[in-house]
Amino acid sequence: MNPTVGIAVILTVLQAAHCQMVKDLSACLLGQSLRVDCRYENKTSNPLTYEFSITKDNRKHVIHSTMSVSENIYRSRANVTMHKNLVCLYLQSFTTSDEGVYMCELKAASDYTSNQKKNITVIKDKLEKCAGFSLLIQNTSWLLLLLLSLPLLQAVDFVSL
């Protein structure tokens, strides 16, 4: 084997070995909905696939996924948003029957290592309300626009005086 080809193969395997890693999994209540935030570190530009599931009564139930088929009881209530290093699950009309161990599972395309997983136990009475700051993470474009327009608003007030 050509040494250059051997080094290229080793570097490719090493890059794929740590393409993404689930760093943190948290849950909070957003009105009547459950929000589960799955934060990860991604060291590749390869597409990311995900799966959110819940284990209750010793059985895994897929809530929302790009890796497998979601269960019917969750399809109309669940949606997912993806932002840089954050995948968010929203489960509408969250009740005590939705309590259990939630899992976020991530996999980058062409990643030859096992999927990255993290679990969190969700009990409705112990959930905190989602913080205002974390809501801003979801869509910062309107916040940026507001901050950029503040000098204009101040100038308008000064002129009208």
Image (tube, rainbow, N blue to C red):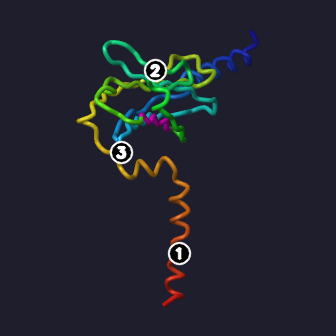
In the depicted structure, whether residue 91 falls above or below residue 136? above
Q: Which residue lies furthest to the top in this view?
A: 1
- What residue type is disc 1 on? Pro
Task: Report the magenta stretch's main SS.
Answer: strand
Mark with earlier residue (3, 2) = 3
Q: What stretch is highlighted in magenta?
A: 86-91
Camera-nearest residue between 16 and 53: 53
Cβ atoms at labels 1 and 3 below 8 Å apart: no
- Give the residue at x 31% y 14%: 57
- What residue type is disc 3 on? Gly
- Give the residue at x 74% y 19%: 4
Q: Residue furthest left?
A: 125
Cβ atoms at labels 1 and 2 below 8 Å apart: no
Q: Name the residue under label 1.
A: 151
Disc 3/disc 2 C-alpha distance (Å):
23 Å
Q: Mark 3 points at which residue?
A: 31
Q: Residue furthest bottom?
A: 161
The image quadrant where one finds the N terminus is: top right
In the depicted structure, whether residue 47 falls above or below residue 8? below
Q: Is residue 10 left or right of residue 57?
A: right
Mark with earlier residue (1, 2) = 2
Q: Where is residue 36 in the image (x, y as percent from the top left)?
A: 40, 35
Mark with earlier residue (1, 3) = 3
Q: Position of residue 86 (x, y in %)?
A: 49, 38
Q: Nearer the viewer, mark 3 or mark 2?
A: 3
Q: Name the residue under label 2.
A: 62
Q: Quadrant of residue 24?
A: top left
